[in-house]
Image (cartoon, grey):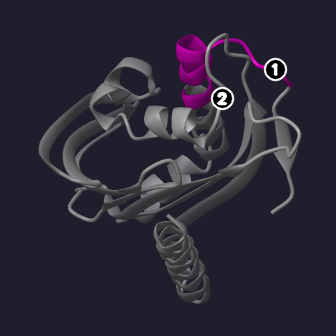
């Protein structure tokens, strides 16, 4: 069990380091088209029969096939390939006047991490998201910490300028959609969501 946990921790650190290197590399090459967001939140829910944990919020984020039901701007989310801790999905996202149809490759470490990469879209040079789940308050097992990062780059400078108008609102709505879905599935919060410093 300890070796398994250690292996998971090492994989999470590798993903974090890759993400940091990716951000650093692209920030030096930024052409104005790159958009990045990083956020950390402490969340918690009251459950009658089980404690809210990393596993429950992980389950919501890893439920890619149902994104079309609860993620804003997601018009389609169909799984086309799945194996243990990995899947490919066809996604369509749309927010007027833009619509993007792409394949997302999603890697998962159960209860700990969900990482999605897209590189075959017509609008984006790349689109990457990373969710990392960690234990929350030591005295409250109903809580966990969510680290979320999003990075994308439009192929067109015009689309990039347009995105400046709505980027922050889209990210906020997307983050909130996952928390609202968790509340729907697991119960009302046992504490107010706290935004943490990274």
Q: Residue 192 placed where, x, y %?
A: 86, 25
Q: Residue 38 placed where, x, y %?
A: 67, 58
> Looking at the rendering, which quadrant does residue 35 occupy?
bottom right
Element under label 1? loop
Between 112 and 27, the residue placed more toward the observer is: 112
Q: Mark 2 vs mark 1: which is more N-terminal? A: 2
Residue situated furthest front in the rendering: 1
Residue situated furthest left in the rendering: 80
Q: Is residue 149 above or below residue 17?
A: above
Q: Residue 106 placed where, x, y %?
A: 31, 55
Q: Which residues are magenta?
A: 178-191
Element under label 2? loop
> Looking at the rendering, which quadrant does residue 127 occupy?
bottom left
- Label 2: which residue? 52
Between 109 and 156, the residue placed more toward the observer is: 109
Q: Is residue 144 above or below residue 30?
A: above
Instruction: Give the alpha-carbon distance from disc 2 to disc 1, as whole Å.
Output: 9 Å
- Label 1: which residue? 190
- Name the side, left or right, on which 105 lies relative to 169: left
Q: Residue at x 76, y 19 (%)?
A: 189
Q: Quadrant of the C terminus?
A: bottom right
**Residue 31 shows up from this direction:** no
- Name the side, left or right, on which 194 lies relative to 30: right
**Residue 145 shows up from this direction:** yes
Which mark is drawn over residue 146?
Answer: none
- Name the side, left or right, on which 183 lies relative to 142: left
Between 148 and 123, the residue placed more toward the observer is: 148
Q: Residue at x 66, y 44 (%)?
A: 168
Between 171 and 161, the residue placed more toward the observer is: 171
For the residues bearing labels 2 and 1, Cβ distance under 8 angstroms: yes
């Amino acid at each position: 069990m300890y070796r398994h946990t250690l292996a998971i921790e090492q994989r999470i650190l590798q993903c974090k380091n890759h993400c940091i290197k990716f951000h650093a590399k692209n920030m030096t090459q930024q052409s104005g088209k790159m958009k990045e967001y990083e956020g950390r939140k402490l969340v918690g829910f009251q459950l009658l029969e089980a404690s809210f944990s990393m596993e429950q919020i992980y389950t919501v984020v890893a439920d890619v096939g149902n994104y079309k039901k609860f993620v804003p701007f997601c018009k389609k989310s169909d799984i086309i390939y799945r194996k243990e801790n990995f899947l490919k999905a066809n996604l369509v996202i749309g927010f007027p006047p833009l619509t993007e149809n792409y394949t997302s490759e999603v890697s998962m470490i159960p209860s700990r991490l969900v990482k999605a990469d897209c590189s075959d879209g017509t609008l984006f040079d790349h689109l990457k998201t990373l969710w990392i789940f960690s234990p929350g308050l030591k005295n409250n097992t109903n809580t966990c910490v969510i680290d979320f990062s999003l990075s994308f780059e439009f192929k067109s400078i015009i689309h990039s300028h347009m995105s400046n108008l709505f980027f922050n609102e889209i990210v906020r709505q997307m983050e909130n959609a996952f928390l609202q879905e968790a509340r729907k599935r697991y119960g009302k919060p046992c504490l107010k969501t706290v935004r943490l410093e990274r």
